[in-house]
Amino acid sequence: MKIKGRYITANLKGKRTIVVSDIHGELELFNALLSKVDYSEEDILIINGDIIDKGQNSLGVLRKVMKLLERDNVYLIEGNCDIIFEQLEEEWLYPYMSRIHTVIHECLKEMGKSINDFPTQKDLKVALYEKYSKERLALLDLPIALETEDFIFVHAGVNEVGNYKETLEWDAITMQRFAEKSHTSEKMVVVGHIPVSNYHENGMLDHRTLIDNGKRIISIDGGNQVKQSGVLNALVITYDEDEYRIETTFVHPFEMREVIQDFEVSYQEPHAFTWPDFEIEVFDGDEHFKMAKHLKTDTDFMVKTEWIIEREGKNYLRDDYTDLFIDVYIGESVAIIGDYKGYAYVLKDGVAGWVPNEVFGM
């Protein structure tokens, strides 16, 4: 099946449009984002896939979106995580559920059941279809793409050549690293699916929306629930007659902490490494940082000691990593991703990096 069998159209001119993607079961963050953009019933709302799984309240998000979909100006595009109710008999399901928190876990909890209560996956499927028919149907046969005057919204990507509607449905919701590819449409293609930070440049883990006017691609997945430092991004699209304007914003789940001492790095050449290329070779250092080599790129860099894990005699980064130090100044506040020995891992303006604890008087 191809996109052309499951795409819809809409007009954005004359109204403000809010676009969000990859909510991944984070109801509080979704509500915070809608509040930040001052969302109202007059706005068009486009949710570009993956509303469930990974976060802790997928049922809450799903039920909120079901309520929102009662309005004619709210659109939900299918993402790869949104089809889990149609995959309940797949062999990979239980191994996947052992690693990832899913909407199925939440359904079982509401039912007071566990996987062990069902002799087969088919038995589980029958029980869930009976109890959660409304939730399942809300996610069934969603549009794969939404086309407007100047935009195409699709979860993961479209074919690089030819009419985008010829893209296979599966490719449209699972395509990898679309922002590094191209397409032939004259319209902007807006995608989620792959966290923006995976396209890092200049050694920075930057989670903010990536707009590539040359390729006509906008990537909005901020890495929420996928990256330790991830955020939930939004696009705000408005029109002045035939000209559109795009604004971006984001929310995050981290506590804020005020800076009481300036910290500024005069010169640095930062590095960033993202999944799945985590193997490193570790050299000398101190209790805070070690010198290391990233084997995939043959890059020498400085790694926080807590970020090193050993497995089967080899060393790896435990997660996406940057050795960027963030400049901070008295009176401003930054988001605290995590506290580590002597340093804090922080988020400032959507970019992750390190500051010494002294900037907080610690």
Image (cartoon, rainbow, N blue to C red):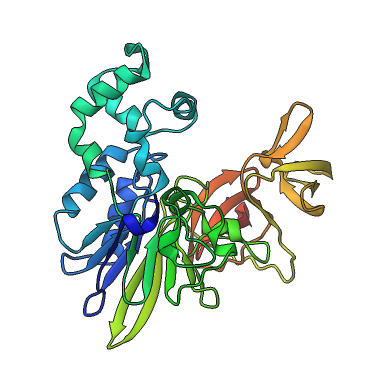
Name the residue located 65 percent from the left edge and 47 percent from the top edge: 342
Q: Residue furthest right?
A: 284
**For the view shown, which residue lies furthest in the bottom direction?**
241
Q: Is residue 170 above or below residue 8?
A: above
Q: Quadrant of residue 249?
A: bottom left
Residue 258, placed above or below residue 337: below
Q: Nearer the viewer, residue 24 or 360?
A: 24
The answer to whether residue 253 of the structure is visible from this angle is yes
- Residue 267 found in image quarter: bottom right
Residue under the image location 35 percent in, 55 percent down: 144
Picture coordinates of residue 236 (x, y %)?
A: 34, 71
Q: Which residue is rendered at x = 33% and y = 74% of the image?
A: 237
Apparent side of residue 342 relative to residue 65 in the rendered image (left or right): right
Q: Nearer the viewer, residue 359 or 162?
A: 162
Q: In the drawing, does residue 337 fall left or right of residue 63?
A: right
How many callouts does the rendering have? 0
Tell me: 162 left or right of 305: left
Q: Tell me if residue 185 comes above or below residue 29 in the rendering.
A: below
Q: Position of residue 36 (x, y in %)?
A: 30, 64
Q: Nearer the viewer, residue 59 or 140?
A: 140
User: Could one spot residue 360 in this view of the protein?
Assistant: no
| Residue 259 picture location, percent across and down | 52, 61
Residue 183, percent across and down?
Answer: 52, 68
**In-image side of 250 versus 332 (left or right):** left
